[in-house]
Image (tube, grey):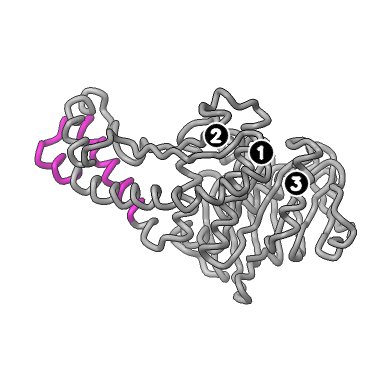
Amino acid sequence: MQLVELRLANVRNVAQAELALRPGVSEFIGENGAGKTSLLEAVYMLSHGRSFRSVKRESLIRFGSESLDVFAVVDRNGRRRRLGLSRRRGDWAARVDGAEIGSLAELLREVAVVCFEPGSHALISGTADERRHYVDWALFHVEPEFADQARRYRRALKQRNALLRGRGAERDLDAWDLELARAGLAIDEWRRGYLDQLQPVVSELADRFIPELGLPSLNYQRGWTAGITLIDALVQRRERDGDRGHTSVGPHRGDWRISFVAAPEREHLSRGQEKLSALVCLLAQAQLFHRQTAEWPVICLDDLASELDAVHQTRVLEWLDGVEAQVLITGTAALPIPTERRRFHTMFHVEQGVVTTLL
């Protein structure tokens, strides 16, 4: 999978940019605030429908502008698609091969992007929302029925919560409990299976990047008490949920955690180790994606030099040297790319939102 062309307009401080991208590593160099991260945000939006920064969506739009636009040409095994994503104040609009589409999901499944950035430690130390998104994004791309089941689950959850707040009829709650349980069990099975497949890949990369922490384990929490079915959990919690006005059990309450032999609890990790653990999980996700689909996702690494020390930077670059993924890296200075890899390397300079190709 490769981005061949990228154009964006009014994304943060980038008024206009047009890039021709090549396979291998593309490095974006410039001072802090120059607009480097905005380029990666634009790429990330094409795959996730949001920025990797936790900000209001409207703040992505350049100050003084009414909308933002991102256009890309993606090549997947020789098949090229033209993708367009726009945000006017309040909503997204998406196009594939020039035709406007009704569902943003149709565009998001056309390109896969994983990103390590300064906030990635939230995957380890942040809320369960981040970890659920991490797993569900992968399932969206590799399980054809996942999006439909997730949509059914969200609809049933919304209806059940409305009935709980309105003290709806018992028979109506019975119907939505059944629908919620059916979709929820499918989601639970997919999530558990995905983490089982991810475990050996995480172990392999943890041994490479953070061997001092020992063997890692991915610990799955499905979102309701072990030993009972989801439908029974919903019925048992119905009175309490009615008092609170929302559903307290189910996959929307699910989570997973990574632990290590030398750091069984998250609190045992330093901030640097949290970042390295997140990096391991993200690169493992990229590698598993390749094994499942025979394609590499686009890998974005934002401000890598400031996030990792020199030893770990070298380890990452050595790992990247052995894979065929397209990689986009930002930094204030060039990284030590080996001379023999320069033919697979493109460098851009970014200054005040203007992007120039250097080599």
Question: Residue 70 is drawn in which quadrant?
Answer: bottom right
Alpha carbons under labels 1 and 3: distance apart: 10 Å
Which residue is label 1 attached to? 210
Alpha carbons under labels 1 and 2: distance apart: 10 Å
Question: Residue 165 is drawn in which quadrant?
Answer: top left
Which residue is label 3 attached to? 315
Q: Nearer the viewer, residue 300 or 287?
A: 287
Q: Which residues are magenta?
A: 149-176
How packed is label 2: few (under 14 Cα within 10 Å), some, or many (20 or more)? many
- For image coordinates 56% across by 39% down, the residue present is 215
**Is 326 placed left or right of 241 in the picture?**
right
Label 3 amino acid?
Arg
- For image coordinates 52% across by 29% down, the residue present is 264
Q: Position of residue 129 (x, y in %)?
A: 46, 37
Q: Is residue 166 magenta?
A: yes
The dominant secondary structure in magenta is helix
Marks 2 and 1: in contact by CB < 8 Å? yes
Q: Nearer the viewer, residue 15 or 197?
A: 197
Which residue is label 2 attached to? 260
How packed is label 3: few (under 14 Cα within 10 Å), some, or many (20 or more)? few
Q: Which mark is residue 168?
A: none
Q: Nearer the viewer, residue 277 or 3?
A: 277
Q: Position of residue 203 (x, y in %)?
A: 57, 46
Asked if one can make out residue 64 in the rendered structure from this viewpoint, the answer is no
**Is 41 placed left or right of 106 in the picture?**
right
